[in-house]
Image (cartoon, helix red, strand yellow):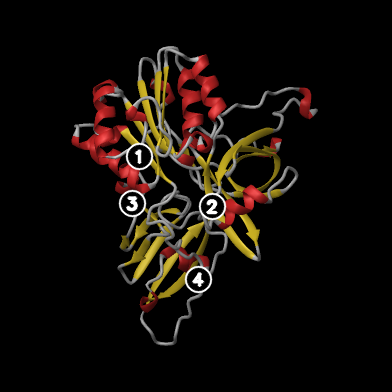
Amino acid sequence: MAAVNLGSTGVRKRRGRFHELEVAEVRPLTSDSVEVTFTVPAELIDEYDYVAGQHVALRAEIDGHEVRRSYSICRPPVRPATGPSTGSGGPSTGTISVAIKRDLGGRFSTWANRELRAGHRIDVMSPQGTFTSNLAELDGRHVVAIAAGSGITPMMALAHTVLEASDSARFTLVYTNRSTLDVMFLDELADLKDRYPSRLALHHVLSREQRTAPLLSGRIDQAKLDIMLDALIPPATVDEWFLCGPFELVQLCRDTLEARGVDPAHVRFELFTTGEPGEVRPDAGRPVVVQTGEPVVHIDFTLDGQSSSVDSPVSANESLLNAALRVRPDVPFACAGGVCGTCRAKLVEGSVNMRENYALEPDELERGYVLTCQSHATSENVLLDYDG
């Protein structure tokens, strides 16, 4: 079993592993999004134990190509009851649910919305990520979430968990969409508001639909965000911030909060995209040929207790992940864009240049962890440990 680490939120960190799970239900949320629920068999309950805010990677073969995408878990964790249902007094089956919104040109999201049905079986990685709160310290705390579109997915699990964990915790959600028809989990959010009327503040912002309050109409830009922070959610009243959506909105919120004196350690963020619309996702596992006599970087790595080596041509300028996949197809990865953190490994020897990082926390960087999908060797030899 891979080593387990604890992040600053107390999240148990373990290397992600794929298991084939059966789809229990596919439920429409809007015209272009669905909630997909998977059955977790009794023998995998511990593997799929998760905390609110984490995500899973899904892997499927579509049109002859392997496609992987990461999606946040949208339901709060519920530990299955133990009892005679399994015939041995052990845990019964569990479930894990994600929401998938169809992206323009998105191969996986389009396939999932159109083709995925109950009874289908696909590969689901064990839960990953640290986009979560310290549930042991919620009494009297005010948690604020700002989400756009499918960025609501982890917020659903977080809101349920925070409000249920403490009778004195408060949760404020600012959720922006184009129109009412685009709002995912609209009924569930209304039910949650009815259940916690004094402790849940819910603000729907619609960019293409006029609302009674001008503040809740139009895009969230600098001016609108400043007014929100002055009138709706003064930073001095907030203990923890969660941001999830497109890069531009998340970065706007991060910069504005920092300018107002909010400690970045109290601001957590998650991205579904990092670049411009239509940007091609980085390749993982692209073919590279080593020519005799050309300069190479020698990469050694440990995965599941087994050592492997690969030479990477300096001229190819390939990522450590790309090189490792050429000799070990089971090397873990999902987004290959520096967002999900699935390809995380510890740099034991050598040096690298990590181009992007939207997943590793400061303490992980200090301990030598890198995202192999974004890391390029700057030394002749590199030693990695995926089990560390």
Query: Which dot, 2 or 3, sits closer to the camera?
Result: 2
Determine which residue is flagged by label 1: 219
Query: Which dot, 4 or 2, sits closer to the camera?
Result: 2
Instruction: Please determine whether, in this image, residue 138 is positioned above or below residue 353.
Output: above
Determine which residue is flagged by label 2: 69
Q: Secondary structure at mark 2?
A: strand
Q: Secondary structure at mark 3?
A: loop
Relative image position of residue 182 (x, y in whole percent): 51, 38
Q: Amino acid at mark 3?
A: Gly
The residue sitting at 52% across, 15% down in the picture is 195
Query: Which dot, 3 or 1, sits closer to the camera?
Result: 1
Q: CA distance from mark 2 to mark 1?
A: 27 Å
Q: Amino acid at mark 2?
A: Arg
Query: Which dot, 1 or 4, sits closer to the camera?
Result: 1
The residue sitting at 45% across, 35% down in the picture is 11
Give whichever of discs 2 and 1 has the lower sequence position. 2
The residue sitting at 29% across, 47% down in the picture is 366
Q: Secondary structure at mark 4?
A: loop
Q: Amino acid at mark 1?
A: Arg
Q: Amino acid at mark 4?
A: Arg
The circle on residue 368 is 3
Give whichever of discs 3 and 4 has the lower sequence position. 4
> In the picture provided, is 187 more to the left or to the right than 147?
right
Determine which residue is flagged by label 4: 286
For label 2, count other residues whose C-alpha is less than 10 Å away and answer few (under 14), some (14-19) or many (20+).
Answer: many
Give whichever of discs 2 and 3 has the lower sequence position. 2
For label 4, count other residues whose C-alpha is less than 10 Å away and answer few (under 14), some (14-19) or many (20+).
Answer: few
Quadrant of residue 215 within the rendered picture: top left
